[in-house]
Image (tube, grey):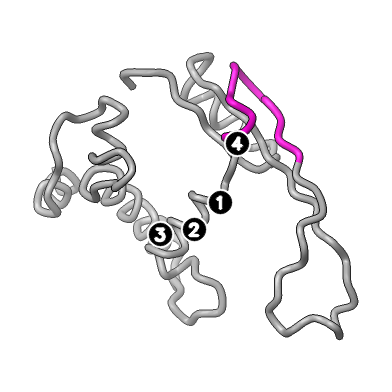
Amino acid sequence: MSHRVQISSDALRAYTDAVERAFGAEVDYGSIVKTFSHTDLAEQRRYSPPDVMRIKRSAVKGNPIVDLISTSHVVKTLRMHCRRLTRLTNAFSKKLENFKAAVALHYAYYNFVKSNIAIRCTPAMAAGVTNTFWTVRDLVEMVEA
C-alpha cells in the first residue's frame, strides 16, 4: 500500500487476528458494535430489522478516526453487487468453493475495474496498488495467470 489505511469491522475476534496478519502494525483499525432493541415479534412486520439502540465505536489498533468507523458501506456494497449475499433471495451457491470464488471476483472487480465516483478512480488506484484502470479482460487475464 502506498499509504496507511483505516479498517473497520464488527467485534468478531477473528478479524483482529486477520488484520494483524495482513497489515501488522501498519494499519488504523477500529470496531463497531451495535446494540439492537428487543421488541415483541408479533408487533413487527415479517422482515423488519430491529431498532438500533446504541452504537459503540472503539479503536483496536493504531489511531483510527473514530467517527469514520463503520461497516455500513461494505455491507451495502457487497450485498448490492453480490446477489448471493442479498437477503431473502434464492441466488445462493450450492458449494462453498463457488461462493468464495463469487465473492473474490466481486472484490477484484470492485477494487480494480469499477470507478468510484467519490474518489474518481478505483480503490486499487487510490491505494497505490495500480496506476491504471483495469478492464474486465485485464481482470480475467490476471486470474488465468
Q: Which residue is mark 2?
A: 76
Q: Quadrant of the C terminus?
A: top left
Left or right of 86: which side holds 50? right
Q: Give the secondary structure at mark 3.
A: helix
* Relative depth, front residue between 124 and 142: 124
Circle 1 packing at 10 Å, graded few (<14), some (14-19), many (20+), is: few
Q: Which residue is mark 1?
A: 72
Q: Position of residue 72 (x, y in %)?
A: 56, 51
Is 90 drawn above or below residue 50 in the view shown?
below
Query: Label 2 to label 3, Cα distance in Å?
Result: 23 Å
| Picture residue at 46% right of the left edge, 74% below the top | 92
Q: Give the secondary structure at mark 1.
A: helix
- The amino acid on which the numbered mark 4 sits, given as a three-letter code, is Ile
Is 74 drawn above or below residue 102 in the view shown?
above
Mark 4 or mark 2, which is nearer the start of the sequence?
4
Q: Quadrant of the N terminus?
A: top left
Residue 99 is marked as none
Q: Position of residue 124 (x, y in %)?
A: 28, 35
Region of the chain picked out in magenta, as a range: 56-69
- The amino acid on which the numbered mark 1 sits, given as a three-letter code, is Ser
| Picture residue at 43% right of the left edge, 77% below the top | 91
Q: Which residue is mark 3?
A: 97
| Picture residue at 71% right of the left edge, 30% below the top | 58
Mark 1 or mark 3, which is nearer the start of the sequence?
1
| Picture residue at 23% right of the left edge, 39% below the top | 121
Circle 4 packing at 10 Å, graded few (<14), some (14-19), many (20+), is: many
Query: Label 1 to label 4, Cα distance in Å?
Result: 9 Å
Q: Which residue is mark 4?
A: 69
Mark 4 or mark 3, which is nearer the start of the sequence?
4
Is 54 drawn above or below residue 28 in the view shown?
below
